[in-house]
Amino acid sequence: MFEKKILIIVDYQTDFVTGSLKVPGAAALESGIAERVEKAYADGDKVVFLKDTHPKSYLQTREGRCLPVGHCIIGTEGHELYGKVKALENRHGSSTLDKLQFGCLDIPRLLRGEQIRPAEFVLAGLATEICVISNALILKAQFREVPVKIESALCAGLTPEGQEAALAVARACQVEIV
């Protein structure tokens, strides 16, 4: 087993940056997220890109009935990573995981398959109060002795209040905000 730091970029996809479910402030994060990914590659860290992923029948799903805005549909441009971040996908042993819900349960399987023991997790991306917090708490539960951090300057929420509430919950659950 190899010990590595893990950088997780959550849902930095076209539909959330410029598309059907645009997150305010998401476009302004592009260069910062790209620089953070490049730093992780240079440091030899593992980079995992998470992609919100929905079928064409999304509006008939429970989530689609609660949030009736088609987004991140498989095979569409909106499903793809955005801008400079997309150009950094599939490099230096990075991995991309499609997730069908807010949180991704496949990270432990991925790391076991690659024989990686996480030294720490750092998350950045969209939307802080939905998918970033969901993934941070899942990782905290699955890897209770591994530090989990959120780079708040590289995250955007649907609202400033939602962003702050999510970060407050994260702090209460011993997720470090950096």
Image (cartoon, grey):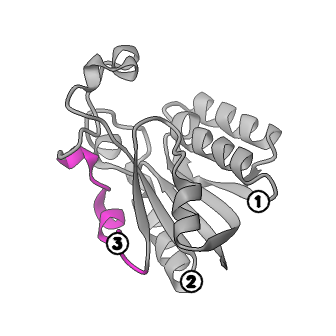
Q: Earlier in the sequence, mark 2 or mark 3?
A: 2
Q: Position of residue 122 (x, y in %)?
A: 63, 60
* Position above or below: 42 against 138: below
Residue that lies at the very extreme toward the top in this rendered image? 65
Q: Which mark is residue 44?
A: 2
Q: Residue at x 66, y 49 (%)?
A: 139
Q: Residue at x 79, y 40 (%)?
A: 173
Q: Earlier in the sequence, mark 1 or mark 3?
A: 3
Horizontally, residue 102 falls left or right of residue 108, namely: left
Viewer-nearest residue: 92 or 26: 92
Q: Is residue 52 magenta?
A: no
Q: Which mark is residue 85?
A: none
The residue type indicated by label 3 comes to: Asn
**Real-space CA distance between mark 2 and mark 3, rounded to the nearest whole angstrom:** 14 Å
Q: Earlier in the sequence, mark 1 or mark 2?
A: 2
Q: Residue at x 44, y 71 (%)?
A: 94
Q: Position of residue 85 (x, y in %)?
A: 36, 64
The residue type indicated by label 2 comes to: Gly
- Do callouts 2 and 3 mark residues in contact (Cβ within 8 Å)? no
Q: Residue at x 35, y 41 (%)?
A: 16
Q: Quadrant of the N terminus?
A: bottom right
- Residue annotated with mark 1: 147
Viewer-nearest residue: 54 or 124: 54
Label 2 secondary element: loop
**Real-space CA distance between mark 1 and mark 3, rounded to the nearest whole angstrom:** 25 Å
The residue type indicated by label 1 comes to: Pro
Q: Position of residue 125 (x, y in %)?
A: 49, 51
Q: Which mark is residue 90?
A: 3
Tell me which segment is drawn in magenta: 77-92
Horizontally, residue 37 falls left or right of residue 135, namely: left
Q: Quadrant of the C terminus?
A: bottom right
